[in-house]
Image (cartoon, grey):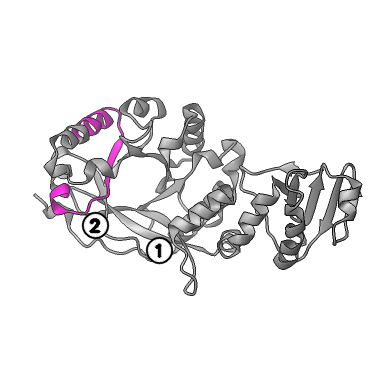
Amino acid sequence: MFTKCVNCGVSIKFADEGTFHLKNVTEQEINRLSFPVIGLEGTYKTGYQSLTQLEEMTGEVTALNKKIDCGISSKNNHAQFMTAELFKTRLENRDTVEFIQDGKLVSHLQPIVNISTGEVYAYESLLRADSSEKNISPYELFQVASHAEMHSLLDQRAREEAIRARKNHIKPGIKSFINFLPSTIYNPEYCLQHTFSVVNKYNVDPADLVFEVVETEKVQDVDHLKKVFQTYKREGMKVALDDVGAGFSTIEMLKLLEPNYVKIDRSYVDRCDENINKQDFLSEVTHVSKELGITVLAEGLERIEELKVCKDIGIDLCQGYLIGKPEPTAKTPIINTSAAS
């Protein structure tokens, strides 16, 4: 009667005259509920028109938690199966949930510079809640999305906001690094169509976009990630592999995934001037990447000594608080890396 569409990021909006579905419950149990329910093809449903009304119904549904299978469907007839416990999680975090559902999000931009010239090469788009009244940290935003099973929707929202922000703040030719979670892209050919349509909507040059996989240590299906990369590339976009040196992101994966960029995990950059083993690793990754035609980016730079090491090794790009913090608008870097020696 309704389909499961979690991975493609369908918007499930609480206050959208939704339908509350109950399954695997007896007629006797249904009769005990205080709200009207209509039976249809082995399931039962009841309408709601506000989050408050849904909360009241959820209290009763929670009592049937072990016996029911619940879903919410919006006007476009998509639905997401969920338990009463998941309803409870969303209700307990309703402020953050509504920020995600309503798209009340903005991108803060952190500069990425060419180490040799000091020129701005790109900005990474980092998602933030758009609120002057409620202090919702990025950590809270993503934690709630994960626990409320809304990470697919948040990931889609993040990509859309990054592309929109680019149109308003970043000049053509300067690239945008945009994060994505591969686990939220169930079928690249289908799930990424929304992203590609947003690119067309804002008339952004695909060549200016770099999609960066995050949480690489959690990726288990490397073949799936390769398909995601290939789908982006076919549309004329670039891809980046994050956290090289952590998790599965070993040098061997560079040859298999063929990213355009690699970002070296900040743990190898932190105080690299004081650790010969870190310097050896940075040199090895840089050497192999250059042989494969991959651009190398060192992230997390906070000290001038770290910058000097990266520059001497021949790393192409750098990013970190030493260069500039994430800001609502594209700011000029606070240090000229070309002068570091």
Instruction: Please tell me whether mark 1 sits on a helix, a strand or a loop.
Output: helix
Image check: 32 left or right of 214? right
Closest to the observer, 10 or 87: 87
Residue 33: horizontal and vertical position, in percent?
85, 57
Residue 172: horizontal and vertical position, in percent?
39, 55
The amino acid marked with disc number 1 is His
Image check: 335 left or right of 206? left
Residue 29 lies in magenta, yes or no? no
Vertical position of residue 266 compared to residue 292: above or below: below
- Which residue is pictured at 37% across the width and 27% down the height? 253
Quarter-of-image position of residue 3? top right
Determine which residue is flagged by label 2.
Answer: 323
Closest to the observer, 276 or 179: 276
Magenta residues span 283-307
- Which residue is pictured at 50% across the width and 58% down the height? 161
Q: CA distance from mark 2 to mark 1?
A: 18 Å
- Which residue is pictured at 19% across the width and 51% down the height? 117
Vertical position of residue 132 compared to residue 61: above or below: below
Determine which residue is flagged by label 1.
Answer: 169
